[in-house]
């Protein structure tokens, strides 16, 4: 019998502001090895989380059409571009592991990619990594300290989970990438929450 799925209350949109930096040989040397291993893993995060847990699910926080802000923009997704914003929690055994924010330009949601606008609780990563045309651009990483919206999210989740310690004081870490699907760009940002395997467990 499956374990009951927790339903976490989160206000949408969480949004995300980070000091993103490209990954070079030296700027991650001070990170602990489990975290570095997860941050730099270019394979499917969804598949890795599933391998670590008995029950994996996606909880959709919200989806909304917006105009791309400076914080969400990139070299391939310009400020002012109409986008679909999707925010979810990736949850393993009722413990939120990752906050994920996806930026999908409306112009990319054509042809077979129209299905990306109607994922429901399907993991976006699973759909992407099953697409043979997928190309991933370089990773960028950022830390998130107290006061950031994603840290406030983590504290809110902690208050909803009796077994999760709420006195987490270290920065949270995340990464983002541009994915090209049939030469159409979209951006996925993933932030590891305090109870994430990434902070203490290297192998699935």
Image (tube, grey):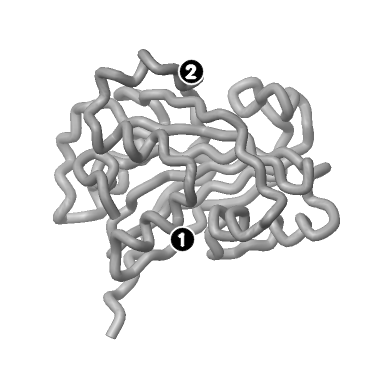
Q: Position of residue 189 (x, y in %)?
A: 51, 37
Which residue is at the front of the view, 19 or 44? 44
User: Taking 130 as reference, is 203 left or right?
Assistant: left
Q: Residue at x 25, y 18 (%)?
A: 30
Residue 21: assigned label: 2
Which quarter of the rendered picture does the C terminus lie within? bottom left
The kind of secondary structure element at disc 1 is: strand
The residue to which callout 1 is attached is: 58
Which residue is at the front of the view, 156 or 97? 97
Label 1 CA crowd tier, 10 Å (few <14, some 14–19, many 20+): some
Q: Residue at x 63, y 43 (%)?
A: 85
| The image quarter in which residue 99 lies | top left
Q: Is residue 8 above or below residue 67?
A: below
The kind of secondary structure element at disc 2 is: strand
Furthest-top residue in view?
Answer: 26
Label 2 CA crowd tier, 10 Å (few <14, some 14–19, many 20+): some
Q: Is residue 69 above or below residue 56?
A: above
Q: Position of residue 97 (x, y in %)?
A: 33, 50
User: Taking 54 as reference, is 169 left or right?
Assistant: left
User: Taking 64 as reference, is 50 left or right?
Assistant: left
């Amino acid at each position: 019998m499956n374990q009951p799925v927790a339903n976490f209350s989160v206000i949408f949109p969480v949004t995300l502001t980070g000091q993103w930096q490209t990954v070079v040989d030296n700027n991650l040397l001070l990170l602990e090895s489990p975290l570095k291993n997860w941050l730099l893993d270019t394979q499917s995060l969804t598949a890795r989380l599933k391998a670590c847990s008995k029950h994996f699910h996606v909880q959709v926080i919200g989806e909304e059409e917006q105009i791309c802000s400076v914080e969400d923009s990139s070299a391939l997704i310009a400020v002012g571009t109409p986008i679909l914003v999707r925010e979810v929690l990736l949850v393993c055994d009722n413990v939120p592991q990752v906050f994920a924010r996806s930026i999908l330009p409306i112009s990319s949601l054509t042809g077979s990619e129209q299905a990306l606008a109607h994922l429901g609780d399907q993991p976006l990563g699973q759909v992407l990594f099953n697409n043979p045309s997928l190309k991933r651009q370089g990773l960028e990483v950022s830390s998130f300290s107290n006061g950031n919206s994603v840290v406030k999210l983590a504290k809110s989740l902690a208050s909803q989970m009796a077994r999760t310690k709420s006195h987490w004081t270290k920065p949270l870490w995340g990464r983002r990438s541009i994915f090209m699907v049939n030469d159409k760009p979209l951006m996925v940002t993933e932030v590891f929450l305090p109870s994430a395997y990434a902070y203490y467990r290297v192998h699935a």
